[in-house]
Each structure stands twice: as C-alpha cells, then as structure tokens.
Image (cartoon, rainbow, N blue to C red):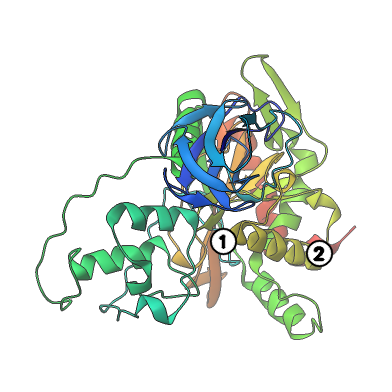
Amino acid sequence: MARYSFRLPDIGEGIAEAEIVAWHVKIGERVEEDAQLADMMTDKATVEMESPVSGIVVELAGEVGDLIPIGSTLAVIETDADGDVEAPTEDTAVEQEIVAETPGAEEISVAEVAAAPVAASPAAPAPAAAPVAAPSHDRQVLASPAVRARAKDLGVDLGQVHAEGDRVRHADLDAFLRYSGGQGYHAPGASRARADEPIKVIGMRRKIAENMAASKRAIPHFTYVEEMDVTALEAMRADLNAHRGGRPKLTMLPFLIVAICRTIPQFPMINARYDDEGGVVTRYGAVHLGMATQTDAGLMVPVIRDAQDKNVWQLASEITRLAEAARTGKAKVEELTGGTLTVTSLGPLGGIATTPVINRPEVAIIGPNKIVERPVFDGDDIRRAKLMNLSISCDHRVVDGWDAASYVQALKKLVETPVLLFAD
C-alpha cells in the first residue's frame, strides 16, 4: 500500500490560496481516479479538483470555508501501489472546470435576460403552496454543489425536495424546510416555527460580502436618478422584433448598451478604473461592459468585450450567450473579468429607483428600473407614455455630480429619440 499526497495545484496566475467550498469525499471512503474530490474557490473562479488516483481517502486538509495555500496537501489517498508518492505542485494534469466566478456587484439579475445587476440580494419568492415530495429513487436530482452541501449539512434528502424548475435551488430547499419543519411535510396553514439555522458564510457569498464591504468602505458613492420616456424606443423594439427573422429577440438592454457606448466618448471619466494605491485613474477607450447576473452559485458579472463595436443584434446574442454560460457554470475566467463599466437591473421585479453599489475598481454602475405606463402632459394634451427611471452610482473621487447628471441627460436624449441610436 502507498499513500498519495495530492497537492493543490496552481489554479490561476497570482493565486496564493483557495477556499474549500465543498468536499465530495469523506475520510475512509474510496475514491476512483478522475472522481471529484472538492470544489475550490479563488478570487477568480471556482474549480473542481479531481483525484489523479484510485484509493481510500485517509486525510483531508480542512473543513468547508478553510483557506488552503497553493502547493500544500489537499488530500492523502491510500493506493495499491508500493511506496509513498506526491502529486507535483506545478503543471498538474488535474482537469479543472470553471463553475463560478467572484462577483463584483450587488445581488441582482441582468435586465430582461433573467438578469441584471446591483441592488442588495433579492431572495427568490417561496412557493404559494406546500410542494409535493417525490421519492428520491424515482429521479436523478439536479442541484448545484452549494445546494448539495447545504442539504447535506441539514440532513435533507434532495430527492424529497420539490423543484420549481429543472433543478433544486436554495428557494426549493427553503420551501421544504418551511413546510416540513425539518421533520416531514405539514399543511401550509399550520403554525410551526423553524429552528434557527446558522449558515457559515463561505464561497461565493463570502466573496460578495467582502467585495461589497470593500466597495462601500473605499468609495464615496453618490447616486443620480432620471426619468426617461421610452415610448418611442419600445415601439421601435416591437417593430424590429416583428421583422427579426432568425435573429435573437431584442430586449431593452441592447438599446441601452448602444446608448451608453455612444455617449462615453463625451464623458470618458464614466468608463474608467481607479487605482487606490497608485493614485491613477485609467480612462478606457473601449467599453468592456459587465452585466451582473444572478446564478445558483451567487452573483456573477460576465463581460461583453468591445461593446462599442457591436450592433443591437450582436449585443442581444452576446447577452444571451454570456448569461447562459454564467448560469450553467461554463463561463471562462476571461469572460468574467476585465470590465470597465457595469449595468445592473432588477428587471421585471421593478422598483422606482435603485442605488447600486459600484463594482470596484470601476467608477460607475448604471441601473435601469422597471418600465411603467402613466399619463403624461404633452403640451395641452395628455397621452399614455412608457416611462423608466435610470440610476447611476458614481465614485465621487473621480466623477463629479455635474458630470454624472450631464452623462445621464445625454443618455436620455438618445433613449427618447431612438433613431439617433442608429445615426452616424
């Protein structure tokens, strides 16, 4: 018998340590070659660690939430080989699949794409009636590693949890606990208190907490809100969709992105980053637009590269592709980093206005709000109009209030006269 020491490989440039967000094995269990050992999160992504050998797990490096240095032993596996061996610390052939990314904006979803950025973590609504349990042996349960780890800690069989969608989510698990009291289902009308549930803040949730706290500590935020009449733009959008052929359906977001990009050259301080330590503001020529997207693993901000070079159809395709990649855990690290400006929206959840938190080290974040119909005065007449509030939060060290207001007024002109979006 031999003991194989699996060392945590180099999983990203400049990464010194990674956090254990889930173990998929226990001490004493047998693990097969290429089977999943653990999920490890860095400040860039979450990666899956796979076993290079088959054998019995005899040692594990720590508990969920612990930070493990790169190159240190993650697990020790007893194999049938002779002599002790160690996994190499560099150029390890362990396959790593990116399953999530560190967020940099608040908990929100991307506009109309099931989507957008920043307002503080909205919780998914609980089902109106008690879900019906399905026997665990009747179906294969689909759930994220975070949901599986939480269910395991709570002693809940995921096969007994009714899923509102194609996989069991935290909201489904919450509903199960609410209606079962942790002991089995009971009528929704019954009054039964749930036991207090301490949840360790780890993984994506810890990164969100750290990034939001750092942003609010370091950046003097201010928010400016303006109302925009999007009646003409909505009519144009409907007409383009009616004649789109095989092209993707257009939401409001691609038009807003075009407007954002067309006004940036007049207000370059909006599309910038601030280096606190160096005291340098970099104003970017290209717009790499982040769009905060809510996923099962937490908030992610996929980035549309060179958004200024894309038309509304190309933007619609890229929004759909990136949002899906983020939600399914297939987004690449380079698709989740390097943004210069972020858009965030609560989408159909609405809200009169938002005060989004800046995705540090960016200096601005834009938040479109829900479109509502209201009567408005048009000279001496009253007409029905579609109105939308738009919020922008800025870093007051870089952007003055006058500049932010002027930028939004320039956006307003394009949005309210949408033909200008397509004019040279």
Q: Which residue does the numbered mark 1 point to in the structure image?
A: 115
The N terminus sits in image quarter: top right
Tell me residue 239's x, y (percent).
74, 81
Q: Position of residue 182 (x, y in %)?
A: 20, 63
Mark 2: amino acid: Gln
Sooner in the amino-acid sequence: mark 1 or mark 2: 1
What's the residue type where badge 1 is placed? Ala
Q: Which of the 4 image quarters holds residue 213? A: top left
Task: Estimate how packed mark 1 is, as few (under 14), some (14 to 19) or many (20 or more) residues with alpha carbons within 10 Å.
Answer: many
Residue at position x 69%, y 34% from top? 12
Badge 2 marks a residue whose secondary structure is helix
The residue to which callout 2 is attached is: 314
Q: Residue 104 in the image: x percent, y percent?
A: 56, 40
| Nearer the observer, 314 or 334 | 334
Give 276 or 86, whichever is nearer the viewer.
Answer: 86
Mark 2 surroundings: few (<14), some (14-19) or many (≥20) residues within 10 A? some
Q: Which of 399 and 314 is in front in this view?
A: 314
Picture residue at 70% right of the left edge, 75% below the top: 237
Report the front residue among 385 and 140. Answer: 140
Dot 1: element? loop
Q: Quadrant of the C terminus?
A: bottom right
For residue 391, say whether it is visible.
no
Where does the image place residue 369, in percent across and percent down from the top left?
51, 59
128 left or right of 243 in image: left
Choose top left, top right, bottom left or bottom right for residue 73.
top right
Q: Which residue lies furthest to the top in this view?
A: 278
Q: How far apart are marks 1 and 2 (CA)?
A: 18 Å
